[in-house]
Amino acid sequence: MTMPRLIPEQNEVLEMLKRTGAFREGHFVYPSGQHTPHYFQMPLAFRYYDTARVLAVALSRKLRLEKDVSSALPKVSIISPSPGGIPVAFAVREALNAEQIYWAEREDGKRMFRQYVQTGDVHPCVIVDDISRTGVALQETVELVQQLGARVIGAAVIVRFRGAPSRLEVAGGDSVPVLSLVDFDAKWYDTGAACTECKQGVPEEHVRF
């Protein structure tokens, strides 16, 4: 019997996301007016325990290969940049047996933690999210946890768009890699006139975000 790999290949992850509806191909139009031939909605994959477990274990294995992460466990905080990344953060926390988990929220355009998270409370941090499209959310979360005096020792996402940074800048002029299971070549068209799918007459589907 063939044992499953702890870190599946990129094409295997994409097939898993397709099977659960978390990755769709077609012709999608965002509220911004941008067109794209692909759409990710990662919570659809994490509604299935077995799929969530495979993805979380794969990310946790990648993180354990980072010396700064493995040497700090279990006194590590898993941080999600937003509520949308909470399922991934909880699954990775369980796989790593890390002690803490936090998630940020946006209020008045600013990313922040809930009240009563104090300086010195947060362990060294691994920032985890479902997808990194631009890297902005990850980098803002780095700055947020550093304001609390916490050290960022790692970062991981299920899917990273190739246009997003592969490293995050941290205090002291250093950086940490953004680990991912899939590095995806995203395609975006600012207008329908530039969209290949529009020119081919592919029916469009409007999505909320």
Image: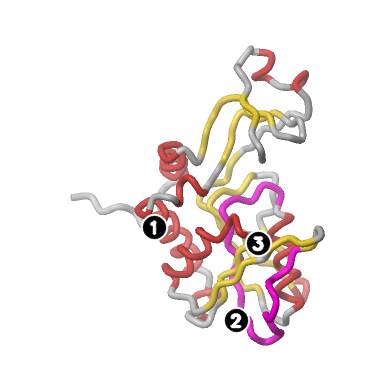
Q: CA distance from mark 1 to mark 2?
A: 24 Å
Residue type (three-letter) at the residue carrying disc 2: His
Q: Earlier in the sequence, mark 3 or mark 2?
A: 3
Q: Nearer the viewer, residue 171 or 85?
A: 85
The label shown at residue 123 is 2
Residue type (three-letter) at the residue carrying disc 1: Arg
Residue 180, position as x, y percentages in the image: 55, 54
Quadrant of the rendered image containing residue 105:
bottom right
Q: Is residue 98 left or right of residue 85?
A: left
Q: Is residue 129 magenta?
A: yes
Q: Earlier in the sequence, mark 1 or mark 2?
A: 1
Count neighbours of disc 3 (C-alpha within 10 A) and say few if under 14, some if 14 to 19, many if 20 or more: many
Quadrant of the rendered image containing residue 128:
bottom right
Name of the residue lying farthest toward the bottom: 120
Tell me which colouring the rendered structure shows: secondary structure
Q: Residue at x 46, y 42 (%)?
A: 17
Residue 34, position as x, y percentages in the image: 74, 31
Check disc 3 and report the residue beneath it: 81
Placement of 5 over or under 168, stated as above or below:
above
Q: How many marks?
A: 3
The label shown at residue 22 is none
Placement of 10 over or under 32, stated as above or below:
below
Q: Is residue 72 left or right of residue 61?
A: right
Placement of 125 over or under 21, stated as above or below:
below
Check disc 1 and report the residue beneath it: 53
Query: What stretch of residues is rendered in magenta?
Result: 111-134
Q: Nearer the viewer, mark 3 or mark 2?
A: 3
Count neighbours of disc 2 (C-alpha within 10 A) and say few if under 14, some if 14 to 19, many if 20 or more: many
| Mark 3 in CB contact with mark 2 (< 8 angstroms) | no
Count neighbours of disc 1 (C-alpha within 10 A) and say few if under 14, some if 14 to 19, many if 20 or more: some
